[in-house]
Image (cartoon, rainbow, N blue to C red):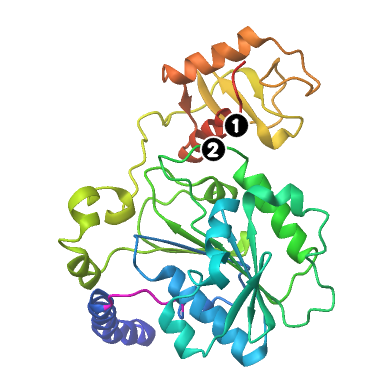
Amino acid sequence: MDKSLVRKLREAPRANKSKKERERLYQLKEWYTIRALLGNTWAFFYILLGARERGKSYSVMKYCLTQWKLYKKPFTWMKLNEASTKKMLANDAIQFVDPDLVRNFNLKLKSKANIVYDNNEKMCTMLALSTAHNDKGVALFDNENDLGFNIVIDEFQLEKSQRRTFDISYNLVVQLENLVRSRKEKVRIFFIGNTTEEASDILSMFNFIPQEFGVYKLKSKRCVIDYMPNSKAYTERRKGTVGDILAGNTSNFTNSIETDTSHVHKGRLTNPQYIIKFSKDTTDWFTVWSGSVIAKYNKEKKRGIAMRRYIDEEFFPEIRDQVFEQYDARSFKYANLLTQKQFGYQLSLIKRQ
């Protein structure tokens, strides 16, 4: 028998034991830590998906404060809307940093406008995704910053009860461009999200829909995603709490995403019929194939249906409304789950007239 194969067989039980031991230790962990995730130094983007009160925001805040105290490296903290940022900044940012972190890091916080100061030194800039266009002309980028950038987008997902008032994905790109410009080194961008029944708009930008727990490394996107299962210690702590009693079965607490895959087409695509266009950009085009199966546009040569005015295509409101009616009646099927999410997202951005 080959010696390398013998060696592998001998080491197999040890490896299995190690994996079981890691699982046992994970189940004992009540709070989340980002230490292992930071080992992926090749990444720009770190996406943390987990249930409420796992310690995601706390762990990232602790990392940012450590960088601040050791290297005087300021950081940026973003929320979805301006109301959330104002709440965090109120009363000298008393609700921004957990009290124990304030004590442990000996912070003396003050806030002025959208800046948080520690001992009269600029520590953090607070921004909202909803105001990205207002911030576009503001000098947020520091070209003499050699320390790098720590940027946090906290709770970036819309809850089911929240109304969509802007394009989250587009505003994110604008706001990040305002901050880092063309920098490709020393950039760490953290996304912190509670899981919801549907994957978020921002996750679609990375062509990722979470369906199973695990750490996903998307090298081409310089992104690592930690979709974390609840540990036994966390579940035990949450048992019997108000949230557990009243809404314990929702994904924000169970940490499982229920994704409807019943309309994902499992066969081959045949005979393209027409192209649905949401903008002039071909990345926002979808081809409808025989059987009303929708796939991402791939240079098919067919007639177009404009979903908006002024995109270099004849616009007919009644045809646009027929697309809405077919979607509402669940008449479409989709080439894959990602296409289903992206098509629905584009429709959600349009206001019917």
Give, as a three-letter code, the residue at label 2.
Arg
Q: Where in the figure is residue 340, as x and y percent of width and height?
A: 49, 33
Q: Mark 1 points at which residue?
A: 349
Identified at 25% across, 55% down, the residue is 243
- Mark 1 nearby-residue class (10 Å; few <14, some 14–19, many ≥20): few
Q: Can residue 291 be seen in this view?
A: no
| Numbered badge on residue 164 | 2
Question: Is the Cβ of the residue at disc 2 closer than 8 Å to that at disc 1?
Answer: yes
Establish if 281 lies above or below 147: above
- Mark 2 nearby-residue class (10 Å; few <14, some 14–19, many ≥20): few
Q: Where in the figure is residue 164, as x and y percent of width and height?
A: 54, 37
Identified at 77% across, 17% down, the residue is 313
The residue mark sitting in front, 2 or 1, is 2
Badge 1 element: loop
Judging depth in this view, the residue of 78 and 218 nearest the camera is 78
Badge 2 element: loop
Which region shows up in magenta? 29-34
